[in-house]
């Protein structure tokens, strides 16, 4: 009975989260395919700007994951009042980050672009895109915090529906405004930004309506977000600060791929855009597994059954290994059909093909260690392990080695991509040891007198 309940809980969340991630990334993939057809410089400019978006998204993920780790344990105990207080804290931090980023980008757009490329044409296209896309930051923060709150109660269907809506709206507007169809002006990257902004506003508005009128468990109201509970703030930050380090390092590591390749040549950055978007699409399976595992593990810890948690951790690891092998093979075989959709130069096409062959091998190892770390260890309340591991791998190995190979040894971009992803191989051993032989289960909930 417990095994059936485990698989039912995991796969119900997993399937919806994977589909939601795929649809969300399809928005970016559609942008890239359309902009790739429009022009390689435009594609490179938007790709560089998206690294800023990625870093911002990583910060929001940290605040959202900190919320989910706490709330999933309270969800296991069916205590809703503490969950509301933690959700309010996460929302405050998410909005604060959005406001700060908007201000920085508004004042220093060119300086932000210079972090990722030195090509003047790419910078100009990126600044045009930033001029509009910066207005999405606040809407995106509110949406991500509310979706994380719903995910902690095992509600994920609304996220999928919102993502499908965003895909349809964004692709429709992009097709019209990027190329100037149906008598509209040809806006290029500005048209792509308008499409994304429209989709983000609709997403946020519909989600707020859903939470206010349809959601059954938390019953969040505006007044819930106007309170600050200092008792929970300390505990929340204790969990979230290591997550900020972890997500920040991962964001920097991913952005470094654009920084390093972007300073090599324009073909490399266009190839990286095409390859990384497909890789991220397939990676959705691993991301969904990590998110679903985190909720299932946290909920089970909240129920107080430690032996059952260990049993679930063993079952999840087997699923992650199967996922990695399957995903790596799938990525290898779909790379050519997907790349054929891009209008890339011959040099960029060859590089993109080489990058995807490398990433199909990387995926096998990533799909085990990332969900095991983020889903089991982090979901169990042990967030310090991941922060320490990433600090060592990224700061002491990946970044120094990649920069040396790119700027000193002057190796090919394909070798640089191997160096940028070498941590995915290294992390497997310490993650396996921690899950199976280390201590990672932590009870984070406080005893409360009421349940809601």
Image (cartoon, helix red, strand yellow):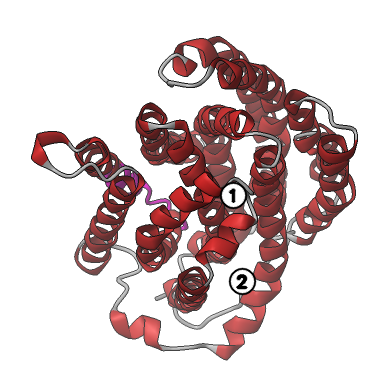
Classify 265 as above or below 344: below
Residue 294 numbered tag:
1
Residue 30 numbered tag:
none
> SS of the residue at dot 2?
loop
Label 1 to label 2, Cα distance in Å?
A: 15 Å
Q: Position of residue 233 (x, y in %)?
A: 60, 82
Q: Which residues are magenta?
A: 152-163
Label 1 crowd (10 A; few <14 / some 14-19 / many >=20): many
Asked whether residue 378 is in view, the answer is: no
Tell me which residue sits at (23%, 56%) in the image.
Answer: 202
The quadrant of the rendering that contains the C terminus is bottom left
* Marks 1, 2: nearer the viewer: 1
**Can you tell which quarter of the image residue 429 is in?**
top right
- The residue that label 2 is drawn on is 445
Q: Position of residue 421 (x, y in %)?
A: 75, 35
Q: Is residue 419 left or right of residue 181?
A: right
Tell me which residue sits at (66%, 64%) in the image.
Answer: 244
Task: Tell which residue pokes out farthest to the left in this image.
Answer: 183
Q: Position of residue 219 (x, y in %)?
A: 30, 71
Classify 227 as above or below 155: below
């Amino acid at each position: 009975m417990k095994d059936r309940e485990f698989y039912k809980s995991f796969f119900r969340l997993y399937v919806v989260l994977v589909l939601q991630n795929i649809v969300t990334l399809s928005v970016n993939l559609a942008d890239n395919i359309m902009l790739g057809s429009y022009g390689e410089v435009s594609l490179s400019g938007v790709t560089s700007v998206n690294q800023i978006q990625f870093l911002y998204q990583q910060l929001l993920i940290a605040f959202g994951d900190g919320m989910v780790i706490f709330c999933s344990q309270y969800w296991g105990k069916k205590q809703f009042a503490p969950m509301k207080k933690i959700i309010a804290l996460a929302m405050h931090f998410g909005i604060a980050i959005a406001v700060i980023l908007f201000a920085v980008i508004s004042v220093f757009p060119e300086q932000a672009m210079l972090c990722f490329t030195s090509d003047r044409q790419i910078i100009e296209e990126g600044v045009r895109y930033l001029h509009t896309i910066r207005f999405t930051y606040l809407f995106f923060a509110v949406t991500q915090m509310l979706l994380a709150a719903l995910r902690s109660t095992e509600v994920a269907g609304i996220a999928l529906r919102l993502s499908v809506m965003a895909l349809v709206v964004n692709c429709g507007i992009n097709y019209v405004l990027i190329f100037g169809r149906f008598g509209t002006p040809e806006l290029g990257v500005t048209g792509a930004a308008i499409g994304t902004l429209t989709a983000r506003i609709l997403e946020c508005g519909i989600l707020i309506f859903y939470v206010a009128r349809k959601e059954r468990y938390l019953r969040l109201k505006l007044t819930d977000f106007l309170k600050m509970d200092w008792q929970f703030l300390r505990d929340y930050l204790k969990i979230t600060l290591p997550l900020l380090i972890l997500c920040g390092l991962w964001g920097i590591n991913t952005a470094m791929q654009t920084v390093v390749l972007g300073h090599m040549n324009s073909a490399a950055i266009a190839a990286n855009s095409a390859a990384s978007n497909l890789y991220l699409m397939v990676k959705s399976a691993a991301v969904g597994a990590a998110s679903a595992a985190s909720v299932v593990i946290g909920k089970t810890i909240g129920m107080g059954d430690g032996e059952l948690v260990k049993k679930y951790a063993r079952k999840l690891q087997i699923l992650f290994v199967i996922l990695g092998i399957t995903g790596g093979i799938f990525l290898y075989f779909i790379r050519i059909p997907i790349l054929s959709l891009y209008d890339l130069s011959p040099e960029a096409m060859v590089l993109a093909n080489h990058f995807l062959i490398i990433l199909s091998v990387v995926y096998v190892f990533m799909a085990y260690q990332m969900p095991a770390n983020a889903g089991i260890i982090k979901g169990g309340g042990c967030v310090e392990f991941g922060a320490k591991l990433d600090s060592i791998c990224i700061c002491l190995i990946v970044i120094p080695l990649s920069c040396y190979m790119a700027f000193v040894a002057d190796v090919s971009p394909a070798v640089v991509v191997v160096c940028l992803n070498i941590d995915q191989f290294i992390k497997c051993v310490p993650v396996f040891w921690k899950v199976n032989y280390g201590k990672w289960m932590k009870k984070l909930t406080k005893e409360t007198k009421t349940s809601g």
